[in-house]
């Protein structure tokens, strides 16, 4: 049996180890003291029980997560419906709204007589129409979001109160960097996810008991292969083998290696990257995002009617929109009826330490035109081996994308047989 090293245990790495465990003698390297990457359910003591709260992967839907749904069905994982409502809170001006319904769009009586609110509705309709027309035209595919907004005369009211906050929250990226995002890719994503129109949103789902439920099923089959707190520090081609050096000082030779990490981490691991690896992997950049699980309600809109499942809070600093995203886990996952729990991303000193349950740092891919261009050639990395790649950077940067990239690779290494068919 040929030997295989899998580097990383995000959903891509877990999937590769799970599906290939009968075909290879597998060793999995994980630098953290837990397995799962963004599949990270944190338990918070509450009275005589522990509350499971997801802090990374939280939700999915039937329309745009087809392969994950097949995987969850394969593992017999149960889900429930949830709401993916969205709110915006401009701290400086006091503007607060939730885009859940007309009622929450006007969270106070004064908002019903606000000229700005009605202008925003008109500008949103203009934005939705322009975005869909742009996709249908199939032209100007290289436009950035900033160029699209300028060319189509989209008012800053629609960009600052909706478009930039929503996309910054989706991709965990600062609003100024979202302006560099390729417009065609962005609007295609929004349309595909029912986010570019009134009343078009899909029914979202979350896993009962948290994403740990599917991770535990995978670990039951793969745990003997996993080396936690053991980072791969160098990957080197040598003759017909691949050498993997780890953080404990060990070096092992493998027939094949799957690098299921972020693109920049993959490139850093390679001792002798070939020109294709260097040219493609170097084009992907990442945001470092501090994350906290807490119960401090002051991060939320002051008007309770404006609360939503995910809430973007921003204020102007030095001419820039300094923003943070706050997930209301009681709404998303029905975690408790005793107190509120929030997962905050890119918070900046906004949270009471005494109300903080857990802290961590995640990284998310940041896409620009060069990265989108590079995606079209990523399949070439897996053409020959013995080093292969997968991860969320192969598409939009989300759980489905990471899993699908792994599923495609597993199918390739399994003589074309889809393991879920």
Image (cartoon, grey):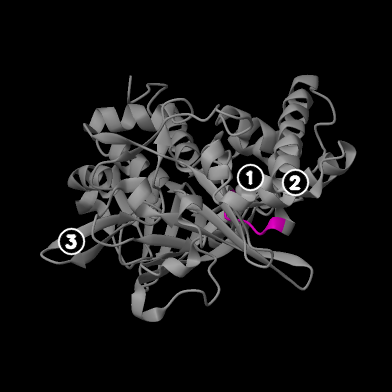
Q: Which residue is the site of mark 3?
A: 50
* Disc nearer the start of the sequence (2/3): 3
Asked which secondary structure carries label 2, the reply is helix
Which span is picked out in magenta? 171-175
- Report the residue at 44% width, 58% height from top: 243
* Mark 2 surroundings: few (<14), some (14-19) or many (≥20) residues within 10 A: few
What is the C-alpha distance between the residues marked 3 and 1?
42 Å
* Disc nearer the start of the sequence (3/1): 3
Whether tag 2 and tag 1 are in contact, CB under 8 A, the answer is: no
- Report the residue at 36% width, 66% height from top: 32
Comparing 257 with 98, the one in front is 98
Q: Position of residue 329 (x, y in %)?
A: 36, 53
Q: Which residue is the site of mark 2?
A: 115
What is the C-alpha distance between the residues marked 2 and 1?
8 Å
Quadrant where the C terminus lies? top left
Asked which secondary structure carries label 3, the reply is strand
């Amino acid at each position: 049996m040929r030997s295989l090293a899998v580097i990383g245990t995000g959903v891509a790495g877990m999937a590769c180890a799970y599906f290939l465990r009968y075909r290879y003698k597998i060793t999995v390297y994980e630098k953290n003291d837990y397995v799962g990457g963004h599949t990270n359910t944190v338990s918070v003591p509450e009275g005589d029980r522990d509350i499971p709260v997801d802090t990374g992967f939280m939700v999915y839907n039937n329309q745009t997560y087809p392969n994950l749904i097949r995987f969850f069905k394969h593992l017999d994982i149960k889900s429930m419906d949830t709401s993916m409502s969205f709110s915006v809170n401009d701290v400086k001006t006091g503007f607060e709204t939730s885009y859940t319904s007309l009622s929450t769009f006007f969270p106070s009586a004064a908002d019903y007589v606000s000229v700005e609110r009605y202008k925003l509705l008109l500008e949103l309709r203009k934005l939705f129409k322009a975005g869909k027309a742009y996709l249908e035209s199939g032209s100007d595919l290289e436009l950035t979001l900033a160029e699209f907004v300028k060319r189509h005369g989209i008012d800053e009211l629609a960009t600052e109160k909706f478009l930039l906050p929503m996309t910054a929250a989706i991709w965990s990226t600062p609003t100024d960097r979202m302006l560099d995002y390729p417009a065609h890719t962005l609007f295609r994503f929004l349309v595909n996810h029912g986010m570019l129109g009134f009343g078009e949103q899909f029914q979202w789902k979350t896993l009962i008991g948290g994403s740990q439920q599917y991770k535990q099923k995978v670990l039951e089959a793969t745990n003997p292969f996993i080396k936690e707190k053991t980072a791969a520090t160098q990957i080197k081609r040598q003759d017909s083998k691949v050498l993997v050096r780890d953080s404990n000082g060990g070096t092992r030779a493998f027939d094949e290696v799957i690098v299921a990490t972020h693109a920049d981490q993959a490139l850093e691991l390679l001792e002798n990257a070939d020109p294709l690896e260097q040219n493609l992997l170097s084009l992907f950049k990442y945001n470092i995002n501090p994350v906290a699980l807490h119960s401090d309600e002051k991060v939320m809109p002051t008007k309770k009617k404006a609360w939503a499942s995910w809430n973007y809070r921003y204020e102007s600093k030095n001419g820039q929109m300094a923003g943070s995203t706050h997930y209301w886990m009681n709404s998303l996952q029905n975690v408790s009826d005793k107190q509120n729990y929030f997962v905050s991303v890119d918070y900046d000193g906004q949270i009471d330490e005494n109300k903080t349950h857990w802290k961590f740092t995640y990284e998310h891919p940041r896409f620009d035109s060069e990265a989108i261009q590079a995606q079209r050639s990523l399949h070439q990395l897996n053409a020959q081996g013995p080093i292969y790649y997968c991860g969320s950077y192969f598409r939009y940067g989300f759980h489905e994308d990471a899993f699908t990239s792994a599923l495609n690779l597993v199918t390739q290494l399994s003589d074309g047989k889809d393991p879920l068919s």
